[in-house]
Image: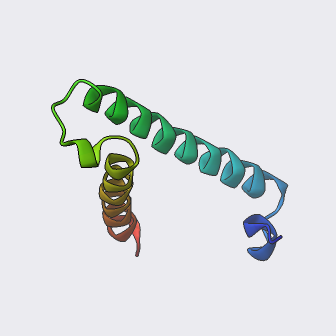
C-alpha cells in the first residue's frame, strides 16, 4: 500500500496537514451525499432510480463538481 505523503516526501507537519485535509474532504463528500439522499427520499423518483441508481448519479455529479474545482485550483 502506498502512502501519498511518503511518495511526495512530506515532512511531519506537511503530512499531518495533508492527512487532516484529506480526511476533512472525504468527510465533506460523505456528508453531502447523505444530505442529498435524505432530501431525495421525499422526492417523487421513478422506481428504477430509487436506491443505488440515484446514488450512482449523485456520485457522478459530485465528481464532476469536484473535478471542476480541482481544475480551477490547478496552476
Where's residue 51, x and y in %? 38, 41
Quarter in which the C terminus is drawn: bottom left
The front one of 49 and 66 is 49
Q: Quadrant of residue 23?
A: top right
Residue furthest to the front in view is 47
The residue at 26%/32% (across/down) is 40
The residue at 82%/69% (across/down) is 6
Query: Is residue 57 placed above or below 20 in the rendered structure?
Result: below
| Residue 22 relative to residue 64: left or right | right
The front one of 69 and 74 is 69
Quarter in which the N terminus is drawn: bottom right
Where's residue 34, x and y in %? 43, 33
| Residue 10 relative to residue 18: left or right | right
Q: Quadrant of residue 50?
A: top left
The residue at 38%/60% (across/down) is 63
The residue at 35%/70% (across/down) is 71
Query: Is residue 1 placed above or below 58 in the rendered structure?
Result: below
Amino acid at each position: 500500500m502506498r502512502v501519498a505523503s511518503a511518495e511526495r516526501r512530506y515532512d511531519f507537519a506537511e503530512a499531518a496537514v495533508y492527512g487532516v485535509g484529506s480526511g476533512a474532504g472525504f468527510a465533506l463528500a460523505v456528508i453531502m451525499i447523505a444530505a442529498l439522499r435524505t432530501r431525495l427520499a421525499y422526492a417523487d423518483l421513478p422506481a428504477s432510480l430509487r436506491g443505488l441508481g440515484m446514488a450512482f448519479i449523485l456520485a457522478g455529479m459530485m465528481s464532476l463538481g469536484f473535478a471542476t474545482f480541482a481544475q480551477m485550483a490547478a496552476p
